[in-house]
Amino acid sequence: MEALTPTQWQFKFFDVSQVKLPDDESSFLSEPGSITSAVAGSESIFFGSADGVVRIVSQAFKVVRSFKAHDTGAINYMKQVQGTSLLVTIAEDLSNEPVLKVWALDKLEKKTGIPRCQSTLTIHNGRKQFPISAFAALDDLSQLAVGFANGAVTVVRGDLIHDRGARQRTVFESEEPVTGIEFREGNITTLYIATTGRILTLVISGRGQGQPAKSLDDHGCGVGCMAVDKSTRDVVVARNDAIYYYGQHGRGPPYTYEGEKNMVTTFKDYVVIVSPPKSNVMSRSNPLRALGMGPADDAFNTSGFTLLNTELRFVAHQEQITSQVKFLVAEWGDLFVLTMDGKIFRYHEKPFSQKLDILYQRNLYVLAINMAQKAGLDSSQQNVILRKYGDYLYQKQDYDTAMQQYLKAIDNTEPSQVIRKFLDTQRIHNLIEYLEELHDHHKATSDHTTLLLNCYAKLKDVEKLEEFIKSPGDDLKFDLDTAISMCRQGGYFDQAAYLARKHGEHEMVIDVLIEDSKRYAEALAYIWRLEPEVAYFNLMKYATVLLEQCPKDTTQIFIDYYTGSFRPKKDAIVIPNAPASSGMGMGLGVASSAVQNLAALLPLPYMNTSAVASPPSGESKSTMSQAQVVETSTDEPPPEYEIPKPRTAFSAFVDHPQEFIIFLEACIESQNMREDDKVDLYTTLFEMYLHTASSKKDGERKEWENKAKTLVEGNNIPIDTSNVLLLSHLSNFRDGTILVREQQGLHFDIFRSYTAANDTQGAIRALRKYGPEEPALYPAALRYFTSSPEILADAGDELDTVLKKIDDDGLMAPLQVIQTLSTNGVATMGMIKTYLSATIERERSEIATNRRTIETFRSDTETKKAQLQTLNTKPETFQATRCKVCDRPLDLPVVHFLCKHSFHQRCLSLDEDVEDESVECPLCSGQNQTVRAIRKAQLESAERHDLFKDALKRGRDGFAVVSEWFGRGLWGWVRRSDTFSDERLYNPIHRMHSETSYLNT
């Protein structure tokens, strides 16, 4: 039994004030014996009186309504159903059986204006006239229990709200009077019955119904000393020795609180206890005796009033009331006490903050924490209490316990406030504990991580450091960059690399391996095991260093990545003398030392743990200590990634020409190169070949120059011509210059290079090779051959060949040839006599031919003019006798055309007037349409000056082109008026074919 003495942890958590009652309405409270019952609910307090009247009091303690509930008897018991307007009243007098009524306070009778009575019921007790000693009801009023002083309990079941009938049954009888009744609802409905000698339970609904009452305790209680804790639904019983709780499984642990008790109820978390009045025995010398006041006067009897928290074992309020307590009701968040002298006292609980201040003053921090938890305060408010408790313990130099409070309040505590208290070296272990907890709660900053790692370093506690950075789980609880930085500064390179690898900071891993540990091979092996994009970034960052330290492997990884064949390497653990898995592939026989060192240092990105061969039982420890990590091969295709431009890798190979050449050659052989990248690759490789050749002796130099020449040979080599020419010139590589110019069709430049060097034979060879494709070389050769007597002598008969080619192809006009040869006195007339005579003879022949053509055109023109004149001035005789369509003799009507063709009008199928000029000779209409189409084309082409300019540009004889377009009417065509005669004069052909003749009658 847990003892709780009245003096232990006693506080004043309630403010007490007397309720000021209105003078005109409070008289009924002070009348002796007037108030017989009181209940509260639904924002009101209900008073029942001895005359059967119910009064409803508001929060201002004004009577808002009163009505006569019972004609006879006193209202000794009432129940207000929370959240409804229902009120249950029980009135009794010993001459009749008790009467129960259910009232609907929100429904008023029209005639009387009082609330409507929903149902009336007479409670039976076997016709035995005994007073009611206890009453309880369920909230839905489906079941009510009434206890009598003769030990009987009657249960009423039915629908009392709608007056649909009810059944009564005496469920319990005892020789001891009933002192209390309470319901407990759940899966089953249990009725707790208290007598003066026992506590019993009776199942009245659900499983076990109908069984006799079960005794829980052989000790009973007094009237009014049983209540229900609404939060736990446990029944509270107050006896002189303790407070007892009865739950679903029987009696719970009691709380000792000695003293007489005549009333108990529950309010919030408290048990309200009213002790009976203590009679003050007056001595003979007491001056009050002279006033005639005896010791039994109620005015001088006091009641003990206590608010007790049995769970936390403290007294929240305790006082002596100068009058007996008659009723206790709770409403509006306060507790009200009605005394025998008609006074009402309000007990208002102090705010929680004030209660905490009271506890702080007495250093009762544990109780404050328990109260905060019980009140459901959030964690931030609870942490304030914990922090104050920690400060209190710290002042008492109880550092370990204080730290435990700070750790509990870590979520809402500024870490610096705690850290400053434990910076002393003697309390470094407490500081480490707090910093570790900060990291576990993810509240640590980079400064906290730095401080924690410094503490580990100060204590040289490598084991703690390892435990901190190798904590299980992927949840990062500290600032990663700070932790790695501190490990590197402290010389813990292995731990820094492990930490970076564990959290996927691959760049940091490689930084540590290269910059701190100087493990270049391990760094390269790690890069080779990363995803393509990550590997590329780190490879480019340390390319120069890796090429210097590991040139062969670094060049290979460059080749793999830039040719699209990069595959992240994978590893497996191999146990000697164990059967190898078939998926290991080649590479199991040799383990790279770099891979071994890397695996011992930190877990590899692609460690294939499934490839571990299982050792025999009993040999696991020794076998695993000899395990090796080796690379495995895979047939999987390389992952897809964006292949960078090869140019991005060029800068990495500075000072590494041989590796650069290997890289460029491998990229050129790859099938994955884009066309624009091939230009860079070929040009750069050509430059590297020439650069290497320049530093070699004769034999090796020739070998490298042949490589360069071979590289740029062919027609489909994607190489930048200007760069190759420049590089060849700078390296004095003439073969390259000529080869590229030839590939690019720069034949004139090749010829000019020979003439600039006065290499006549080279120029002749170039002329013979490129002359058919480049005719402009012949005029240039003519000028070169006649530039000096020496060159002319060296050229020999080649001059006559050049003149013949120029003449045959018309590359130069004769006058241009004479002007070219006359610029200096090298060439003589004798050298060009043959050329000149052939040219003059050819031009004379062309002149004679042109004159004959002119005469022919002139004669044709005169003939046409004569025909036109005849048609315009002389009549035409038609002598045709047969129709040209049906070949029958002509008869009227007949149509004659000026083309000498005659037809029957019916053969022409003409219904319109034959004078219409749109009628044409059917035999000549096709020829007429052809002439019109030709003329239309001439008119349209006469307006296309762009075609004329293009023809003039392409034609060899410009004058002939101008003459042709002049004939087409390029310079305009004079249009005549549309009269018949003018059209005939202008176009006699049209006149001849389009005029319709008259009819011969």
Image (cartoon, rainbow, N blue to C red):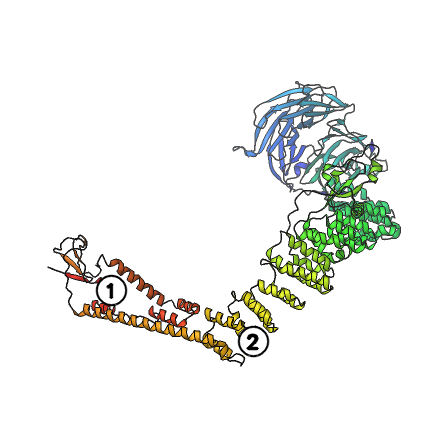
Q: Splitting the image into 4 quarters, where does residue 904 fall?
A: bottom left
Q: Which residue is at 78% across, 53% downward?
A: 520
Comparing 268 with 607, the one in front is 607
Q: Which residue is at 56% across, 24% downward?
A: 164
Three-letter amino acid code of the residue under disc 1: His
Of all residues, the one furthest to the bottom in this rendering is: 825
Say which quadrant the C terminus sits in: bottom left
Comparing 287 with 532, the one in front is 532
Mark number displayed over residue 245: none
Q: Splitting the image into 4 quarters, where does residue 870 fall?
A: bottom left
Residue 715, horizontal then vertical, whole percent: 58, 59
Comparing 222 with 634, the one in front is 634
Q: In this view, does 633 lie to the left or right of 833?
A: right
Crowding around mark 2 (Cα neighbors within 10 Å: few <14, some 14 to 19, many 20+) is some
Q: In this view, does 548 lie to the left or right of 939?
A: right
Mark 2 secondary-structure assignment = helix
Q: In this view, does 128 lie above or below 421?
A: above
Give how far apart the Cα atoms at labels 1 and 2 are: 66 Å
Three-letter amino acid code of the residue under disc 2: Leu
Query: Which callout, 1 or 2, points at the residue further toward the start of the chain?
Result: 2
Comparing 402 with 669, the one in front is 669
Mark number displayed over residue 990: 1
Q: Name the residue under label 2.
A: 792
Q: Splitting the image into 4 quarters, where does residue 620 fall?
A: top right
Say which quadrant the N terminus sits in: top right
Q: Is residue 700 above or below residue 834?
A: above
